[in-house]
Amino acid sequence: MNVSGRVSTARRLRKNQTDAERILWLRLRDRRLNGLKFRRQVPIGRYVVDFFCADAHLVVEVDGGQHATADETNRTRTLEAMGFLVLRFWNNEVHENIDGVLESILNLLDRSEPPHPDPLPCGEREKSD
């Protein structure tokens, strides 16, 4: 899919959010979560991600049963290889425990730095003496 196709898809997805996406968006929008700026349905590479915080290099995905596939695993790996942290929640987690979802997002951001966009292969990291 070309860039204009991904943008069109993102617009369509913004207009047709799932209930879980709507619930989470109401808590993320307007810098409501710790002052962090989130955007929704953002094209990144060949994907359109549910929520994106550029400052934290964080992608948040809300998944229903249709997303429990090998394709989603590959999607996550690809996004991580591009230097993004990827956090996934099931729809029922958002519906039943939105505060826990938000806490998980904050806990991840508190303890991690975004992955380097071009990590060194294993064994090639600088060693301290």
Image (cartoon, rainbow, N blue to C red):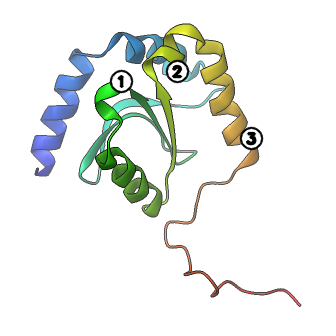
Q: Does the residue at mark 3 contact the one at mark 1 (Cβ under 8 Å)? A: no
Residue highlighted by disc 1: 64
Label disc, if present, on residue 110 of the rendered structure: 3
Q: In this view, does 76 lie to the left or right of 1?
A: right
Give the Cα separation between the discs numbered 3 and 2. Answer: 17 Å
| Residue furthest right in the image | 129
Q: Which of marks 1 and 2 is in front?
A: 1
Where in the figure is residue 81, as x and y percent of width and height? 44, 63
- Residue in view at x 22 percent, y 32 percent: 10
Tell me which label, 3 or 1, sits earlier in the chain: 1
Residue highlighted by disc 2: 28
- Residue in view at x 60 percent, y 22 percent: 101
Q: Which of marks 3 and 1 is in front?
A: 1
- Neighbours of disc 3 within 10 Å: few (<14), some (14-19), many (20+): few
Label disc, if present, on residue 100 of the rendered structure: none
Amino acid on which disc 1 is placed:
Gly
Which corner quadrant holds the C terminus?
Answer: bottom right
